[in-house]
């Protein structure tokens, strides 16, 4: 696992190193250019100075003495130390004086090769594997040529020295910079370390929001996201606890009844009593199974903040027909008739969560089967409206009084003394709401309950 501190330090040192190299390269190039220009100017100045001496008005006999004096002076100059910016250029400059192809004077340090044939001005030439910088000056109103030369390695030494002086402070300060960056990054990450420590030392059951103040803006965003996550987990645990409590409460009686029927079957004195107890046991198992299924469905439909359910396009009529075919054995067992009325030619495309229409119809028709008498009729009618679809489910049961219709859509609420878990209509109401529809309870045309559901048509893009 990589460390934020190490990565940040490495990135900072990398940026610093690249910057130092770029600055060093630019400084080196600039220093090289300036030093070359300065040395060239010095060469030209020396040549001009020598030209001025040669052009002085002297008698012929004095001129020979001047040449001898120049030879000695140039030798001394070659052996002297010249300083530039504090750097020595020991005895690396040479002078030659030519006249009509004849060497008149040469300093001891000058190249032995004849240089008078070079063009006037600055030249670079390799002599005996040594690079020389040469300046050739034609003496005005004379056939004489002055050649001033200097070894290139002297300039290179000075350029390298300047570059080293430029980079040396950075190299010396690099360990100090590394230590300062390490401390600074650690100081900047201290709030994150405190947050991590608070989370690490927190009790697993403690879902209260993190309290860290003050926090940098970046960590404030992280803390806010963590607190929202903790709040969602807290609400989810509350729902789970409520579900477990409700399930335990609702299953207690059915399980006790199942146990009673099982004991009756075991202690029956004759086959007829045993068969009756087993039939009751079978019915109790069916009711308990339906109750557990409804409890799980209701838990799945609990609203969750920030959740975005996925929808698919379905054929409403086909979904209803297939669901009725699945639950028709329940109606056949009670000798009941299931009727479906719908226009086959209508457009039945609808957006639904996967399995939502099936669950909705199962609960509606399942309630109708449970509350309708044997040999009764359950009618399911589908029709289109300008805004969407209408689903009607009519049964022949006792119905629900108008003053109780609002509360029966709440979970575990039953109408009067009717049997059941009180979950079916609650599940239906949740599904309808999640799909932007409405649920309405009315009296059926003859007797019983009519459940009217409006569902929206998919919006065109």
Image (tube, rainbow, N blue to C red):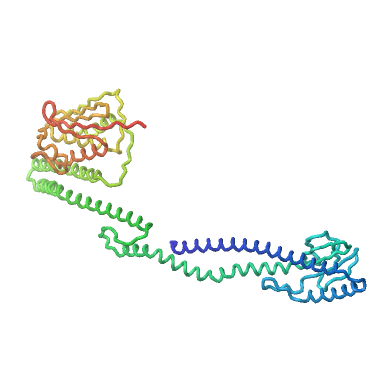
Q: What residue is shown at x 33% (from left), y 54% (from top)? A: 225
Residue 455 x %, y %: 25, 32
* Depth check, front residue: 162 or 48: 48
Which image quarter: residue 326? top left
Residue 371 x %, y %: 13, 35
* Depth check, front residue: 454 or 399: 454
Which quadrant holds the C terminus?
top left
Which image quarter: residue 23? bottom right
Residue 11 x %, y %: 50, 61
**In the visual, does 378 lie left or right of 153?**
left
Q: What residue is shown at x 90% (from left), y 74% (from top)? A: 62
Residue 227 x %, y %: 30, 55
Which image quarter: residue 281? top left
Against 162, residue 360 (above or below) is: above
**In the visual, does 371 lie left or right of 240?**
left
Which quadrant holds the N terminus?
bottom left
Against 335, residue 7 (above or below) is: below
């Amino acid at each position: 696992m990589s460390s934020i501190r190490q990565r940040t330090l490495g990135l900072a040192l990398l940026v610093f190193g690249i910057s130092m190299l770029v600055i060093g390269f630019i400084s080196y190039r600039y220093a090289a250019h300036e030093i070359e220009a300065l040395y060239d100017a010095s060469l030209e100045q020396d040549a001009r100075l020598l030209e001025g001496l040669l052009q002085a008005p002297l008698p012929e006999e004095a001129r020979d003495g001047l040449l001898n004096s120049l030879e000695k002076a140039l030798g001394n100059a070659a052996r002297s130390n010249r300083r530039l910016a504090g750097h020595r250029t020991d005895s690396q400059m040479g002078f030659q004086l030519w006249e009509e192809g004849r060497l008149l004077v040469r300093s001891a340090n000058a190249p032995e090769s004849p240089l008078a044939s070079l063009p006037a001005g600055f030249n670079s030439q390799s002599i005996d594997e040594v690079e020389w910088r040469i300046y050739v000056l034609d003496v005005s109103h004379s056939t004489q040529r002055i050649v001033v030369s200097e070894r290139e390695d002297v300039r290179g030494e000075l350029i390298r020295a300047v570059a080293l002086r430029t980079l040396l402070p950075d190299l010396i300060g690099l360990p100090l910079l590394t230590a300062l960056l390490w401390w600074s990054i650690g100081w900047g990450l201290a709030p994150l370390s405190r947050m991590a420590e608070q989370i690490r030392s927190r009790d697993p059951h403690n879902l209260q929001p993190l309290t860290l103040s003050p926090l940098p803006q970046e960590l404030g965003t992280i803390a806010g996201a963590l607190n929202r996550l903790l709040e969602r987990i807290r609400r989810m645990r509350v729902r789970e606890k409520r579900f477990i409590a409700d399930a335990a409460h609702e299953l207690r009686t059915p399980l006790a009844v199942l146990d009673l029927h099982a004991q009756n079957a075991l202690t029956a004195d004759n086959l007829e009593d045993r068969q009756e107890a087993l039939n009751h046991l079978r019915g109790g198992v069916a009711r308990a199974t339906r109750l557990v299924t409804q409890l799980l469905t209701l838990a799945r439909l609990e609203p969750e903040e920030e959740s975005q359910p996925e929808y698919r396009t379905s054929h409403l009529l086909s979904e209803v027909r297939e669901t009725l075919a699945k639950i028709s054995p329940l109606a056949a067992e009670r000798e009941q008739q299931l009727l479906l009325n719908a226009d086959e030619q209508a457009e039945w495309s609808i957006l639904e969560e996967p399995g939502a229409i099936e669950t909705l119809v199962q609960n509606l028709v399942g309630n109708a089967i449970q509350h309708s008498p044997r040999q009764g009729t359950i009618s399911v009618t589908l029709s289109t409206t300008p805004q969407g679809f209408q689903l009607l489910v009519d049964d022949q049961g006792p119905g629900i009084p108008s003053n109780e219709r609002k509360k029966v859509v709440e979970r575990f609420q039953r109408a009067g003394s009717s049997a059941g878990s009180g979950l079916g209509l609650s599940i239906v109401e949740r599904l309808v709401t999640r799909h932007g529809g409405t649920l309405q309870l009315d009296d059926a045309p003859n007797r019983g309950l009519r459940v009217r559901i409006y569902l929206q048509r998919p919006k065109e893009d």
